[in-house]
């Protein structure tokens, strides 16, 4: 399918019928990678859509991809989570476009927040790096227990627990708007 026929939108209530296929696609992607993705209920994904905190990619009314945002630590941190691309739409930069739109939405809704993510995928690391994320220690991420409970669905959760949430298989990446602005100011002088 041609990439230019795919719409990348901020999801809303009209997209709720896509929730079952979104959840199935997330689950299948986790199985293929042999890792976990935070399990979410249909109600949780529906809420993200109603709040305008999700990105959906559609090709002729067929799901092509998805991602949602969530704030943690009293809105000081924001994660872009659940990034998936349906198999037939992979390999054409759609994940990057969804992530860029999610990044933009996060910055609009939470301009002062630090954006972060955990990933074991090289492609997502590359996308995050292009957006200005840098690898960090887990200690630099939110200490919000609600976020870390989301890792329970991962096959590597025992590593995270054994190390007191200091290490795991995933790479922690952080976009700090304050650090980015400081870096830009220093480079312009």
Image (tube, rainbow, N blue to C red):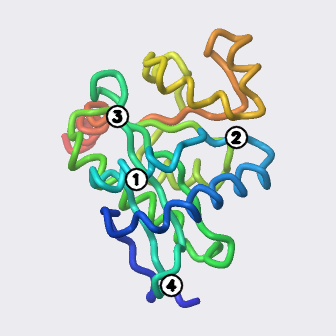
Tell whether 114 sits left or right of 31. Answer: left
> Height in image: 32 above or below 175?
below
In terms of sequence position, does the residue under pointer 2 or pointer 4 come before the other? 4
Q: Which mark is residue 175?
A: none
In three-dimensional space, the C-alpha distance between marks 4 and 3, rounded to whole angstroms, equals 30 Å
> Height in image: 40 above or below 26?
above
Image location of residue 5, percent across then percent down: 45, 88
- Tell whether label 4 touches label 2 (CB within 8 Å): no
Q: Which mark is residue 71?
A: 3
Tell whether 31 sits left or right of 146. Answer: right
Question: Residue at 52% of width from left, 71% of height from top?
Answer: 94
Question: Residue at 53% of width from left, 50% of height from top?
Answer: 82
Q: Which mark is residue 36?
A: 2
Front one among 59 and 174: 59
Q: Residues within 10 Å of mark 3 (few under 14, many from 20)?
A: many
In three-dimensional space, the C-alpha distance between marks 4 and 1, rounded to whole angstroms, equals 26 Å
In terms of sequence position, does the residue under pointer 1 or pointer 2 come before the other? 2
Image location of residue 103, percent across then percent down: 36, 52
Which mark lies nearer to you, 2 or 4? Answer: 2
In terms of sequence position, does the residue under pointer 3 or pointer 2 come before the other? 2
- Residue position for label 1: 46
Question: Residue at 39% of width from left, 61% of height from top?
Answer: 55
Question: Residue at 34% of width from left, 22% of height from top?
Answer: 73
SS at badge 2: loop
Image location of residue 54, percent across then percent down: 38, 55
In terms of sequence position, does the residue under pointer 4 or pointer 3 come before the other? 4
In three-dimensional space, the C-alpha distance between marks 1 and 2, rounded to whole angstroms, equals 21 Å
- Residue position for label 4: 3
């Amino acid at each position: 399918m041609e990439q230019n026929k795919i719409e990348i939108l901020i999801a809303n209530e009209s997209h709720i019928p896509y929730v079952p296929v979104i959840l199935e696609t997330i689950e299948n992607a986790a199985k293929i990678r042999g890792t976990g993705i935070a399990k979410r209920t249909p109600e949780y994904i529906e809420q993200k859509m109603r709040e305008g905190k999700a990105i959906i990619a559609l090709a002729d009314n067929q799901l092509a991809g998805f991602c949602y945002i969530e704030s943690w630590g009293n809105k000081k941190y924001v994660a872009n989570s659940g990034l998936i691309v349906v198999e037939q739409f992979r390999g054409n930069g759609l994940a990057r476009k969804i992530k860029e739109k999610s990044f933009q939405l996060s910055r609009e809704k939470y301009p002062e927040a630090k954006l972060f993510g955990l990933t074991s995928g090289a492609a997502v690391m590359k996308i995050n790096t292009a957006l200005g994320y840098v690898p960090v220690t887990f200690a630099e991420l939110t200490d919000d227990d609600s976020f870390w409970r989301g890792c329970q669905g991962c096959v590597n959760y025992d590593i995270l627990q054994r190390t007191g949430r200091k290490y795991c298989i995933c790479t922690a990446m952080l976009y700090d708007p304050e650090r980015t602005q400081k870096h830009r100011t220093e480079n312009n002088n």
